[in-house]
Amino acid sequence: MSHVILTGFLICRSLEEADRVASLLPEHIRLTRAEPGCNTFEVIRSMADPVRFAVREIFTSRADFEAHQTRVQTTLWGRSTKGIPRDYVLTEADGQRRYALPGSGTD
């Protein structure tokens, strides 16, 4: 079983949008960390550039990662952040590749 690691940035288009994201984060983090197969889930707002959030996720398997993606689409977080640009790299046993989050506006 190989881990799936997602790293990168969620990049808001305004401070107002970033503040809205920040207000939704505690519940999103709590729910995600409770998911089966979630080993690490961190989202940290940049102090130097407050519209950028660094993201780091580690899931036990591809199936766990995909289950997370599916769950998130129906949540307040998923609906509220849909269309916000993301710049993610997904790393699996077979190497790295750019990952466009479904509905993020980058796919």
Image: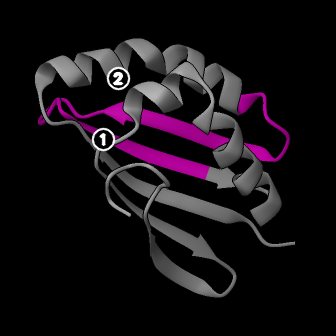
> Badge 2, how many Cα within 10 Å: few under 14, some, many 20+?
many
| Closest to the observer, 50 or 21 | 21
Give the vertical position of 30 relative to 6 (above or below): above
Label total for image:
2
For the point 41% across and 25% down, the residue is 80
Is mark 1 in CB contact (under 8 Å) with mark 2?
A: yes
Rendering coords of residue 14 (x, y %): 11, 28
| Closest to the observer, 89 or 101 | 101
Q: Which residue is mark 2?
A: 21
Rendering coords of residue 16 (x, y %): 16, 17
Rendering coords of residue 61 (x, y %): 80, 62
Give the vertical position of 102 relative to 52 (above or below): below
Q: Which residues are the magenta region? A: 33-57
Separation of residues labelled 1 and 2 (CA atoms): 10 Å
Side (left or right) of 3 relative to 58: right
Side (left or right) of 60 relative to 106: right
| Closest to the observer, 90 or 40 | 90
Which is in the foreground here, disc 1 or disc 2?
1
Side (left or right) of 101 relative to 104: right
For the point 44% across and 35% down, the residue is 43
The answer to which quarter of the image holds residue 92 is bottom right
- Name the quarter where the N terminus is drawn: bottom right
Q: Secondary structure at mark 2?
A: helix
For the point 48% across and 28% down, the residue is 79
- For residue 84, the mark is 1
Side (left or right) of 18 relative to 22: left
Q: Secondary structure at mark 1?
A: loop
